[in-house]
Image (cartoon, grey):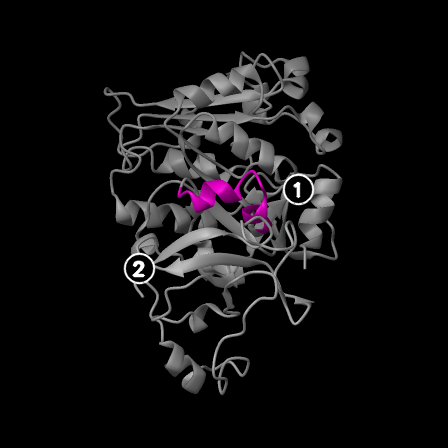
């Protein structure tokens, strides 16, 4: 089922979902463990991130020195263009700065920069060390100004607007940069995105292991749907933070991590028929085949046979556990050549099955 929270957000162009610190830390640490130098001497751009709310910016400021980051750039979208405009007020930090401009504060985006300073003697960095200014435009990632920052950066990391995910991914790919971003699991089926996954240019991160593939987001009080609020917290500045749960969220990246190289432990066809925990598999003599495509249907990830080297249709959630050395991705049901009902899902006994990824086991 589609996630109603995301669906409603897209309809209303409500993109004020802020990633929690723990989710940023948990995901980033996975890349650091695999490659401790992944961010060393790199320029990181967070192009949808106001440090007042963004834990991406705060996190990379805190770890600026120990990760060896060369430069951190964060940009924010103008309040005038956001749903929070009606409740917006400039922070005391901004108002007390000589650069403060009341008109620009609401009509322009902002840019925040932290650069390596060899003369800096302290071992830690903090948010107050960010140098900031107003952008000349509203801070939309598609603007020439932010696109130029994209071209300067080595890695782009953010939670882009849910309503603009396709456009944001296109904007990323055309720059040929490394990235780590958040989006809906449904995005893997988009025509613009699935070919990137199939051709090993984009893959999923690690957060499916936590909260059942959901994320708990911070949202401003002005847009909080109290029926969906799980918790209310008080920030240091006294403002309330409302926590809501959004199902079916994943990290999308092209930065390597160790889980991509961990093969699944699988049973043979014979053992699946005898011992599978799934009644749909156990006791049968073979896997079912599709009416409209020449492949077997494997409805559960743990039922993928270790000794079958033909084409298989499996749940798209395999991408959460996909091992580059173990599987070859051949296509997606509705788009793959050979589907005798193009643009439609596979069927078994005239019954349509849920979305299927077509794979082959390289190790069989």
Image check: 23 left or right of 352? left
Which residue is drawn at the image coordinates 75% and 41% (left, top)? 11
Image check: 23 left or right of 118? right
Comes first in the chain, label 1 or label 2: 1
Task: Locate the C terminus and report the quarter of the image it occupies.
Answer: bottom left
Give the residue at mark 2: 262
For residue 47, say whether it is visible: no
Whether residue 358 appears in magenta in the rendering, the answer is no
Q: Nearer the viewer, residue 231 or 149?
A: 149
Give the residue at mark 1: 220
Q: Classify 227 as above or below 115.
A: below
Q: Position of residue 37 (x, y in %)?
A: 25, 38
Q: Nearer the viewer, residue 112 or 15?
A: 15
Q: Position of residue 248 (x, y in %)?
A: 58, 55
Label 1 to label 2: alpha-carbon separation: 39 Å
Q: Position of residue 264 (x, y in %)?
A: 35, 65
Q: Classify 285 as above or below 4.
A: below
Which residue is drawn at the image coordinates 57% and 55% (left, top)? 333
Q: Residues within 10 Å of mark 2 (few under 14, many from 20)?
A: few
Disc 1 and disc 2 in contact, CB within 8 angstroms:
no
Q: Residues within 10 Å of mark 1 (few under 14, many from 20)?
A: some
Q: Which is the main secondary structure of the residues drawn in magenta?
A: helix
Q: Nearer the viewer, residue 107 or 336?
A: 336
Which secondary structure lies at badge 2? loop
Task: Locate the N terminus and report the quarter of the image it occupies.
Answer: bottom right
Which secondary structure lies at badge 1? loop
Q: Which residues are magenta?
A: 186-200
Dividing the picture into quadrants, the one containing residue 123 is top left
């Amino acid at each position: 089922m589609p996630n109603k929270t995301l669906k409603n957000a897209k309809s209303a162009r409500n993109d004020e979902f802020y990633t929690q610190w723990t989710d940023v830390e948990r995901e980033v640490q996975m890349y650091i463990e695999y490659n401790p130098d992944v961010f060393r001497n790199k320029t990181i751009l967070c192009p949808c991130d106001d440090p007042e709310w963004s834990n991406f910016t705060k996190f990379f400021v805190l770890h600026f020195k120990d990760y060896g980051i060369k430069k951190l750039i964060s940009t924010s979208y103008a309040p005038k263009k956001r749903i929070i405009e009606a409740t917006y007020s400039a922070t005391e930090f901004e108002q007390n700065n000589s650069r403060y401009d009341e008109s620009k504060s609401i009509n322009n985006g902002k840019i925040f920069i932290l650069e390596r300073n060899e003369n800096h003697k302290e071992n830690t960095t903090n948010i107050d060390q960010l140098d900031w200014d107003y952008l000349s435009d509203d801070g939309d990632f598609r603007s020439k100004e932010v696109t130029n920052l994209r071209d300067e950066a080595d890695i782009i990391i953010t939670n882009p607007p849910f309503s603009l995910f396709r456009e944001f991914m296109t904007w990323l790919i055309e720059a040929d940069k490394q990235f780590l971003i958040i989006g809906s699991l449904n995005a893997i089926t988009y025509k613009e995105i699935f070919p990137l996954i199939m051709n090993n240019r984009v893959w999923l991160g690690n957060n499916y292991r936590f909260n059942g593939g959901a994320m708990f987001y911070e949202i401003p009080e002005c847009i909080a749907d109290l029926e969906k609020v799980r918790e209310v917290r008080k920030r240091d500045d006294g403002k309330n933070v409302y926590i809501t749960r959004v199902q079916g969220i994943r990290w999308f990246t092209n930065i390597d991590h160790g889980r991509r190289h961990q093969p699944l432990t699988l049973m043979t066809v014979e053992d699946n028929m005898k011992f599978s925990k799934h009644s749909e598999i156990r006791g049968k003599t073979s896997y079912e085949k599709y009416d409209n495509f020449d492949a077997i249907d494997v409805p559960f990830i743990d039922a993928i046979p270790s000794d079958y080297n033909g084409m298989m249709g499996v749940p798209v959630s395999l991408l959460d556990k996909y091992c580059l050395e173990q599987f070859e991705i051949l296509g997606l049901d509705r788009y793959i050549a050979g589907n005798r009902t193009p643009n439609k899902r596979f069927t078994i006994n005239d019954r349509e099955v849920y979305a299927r990824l077509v794979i082959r086991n390289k190790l069989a």
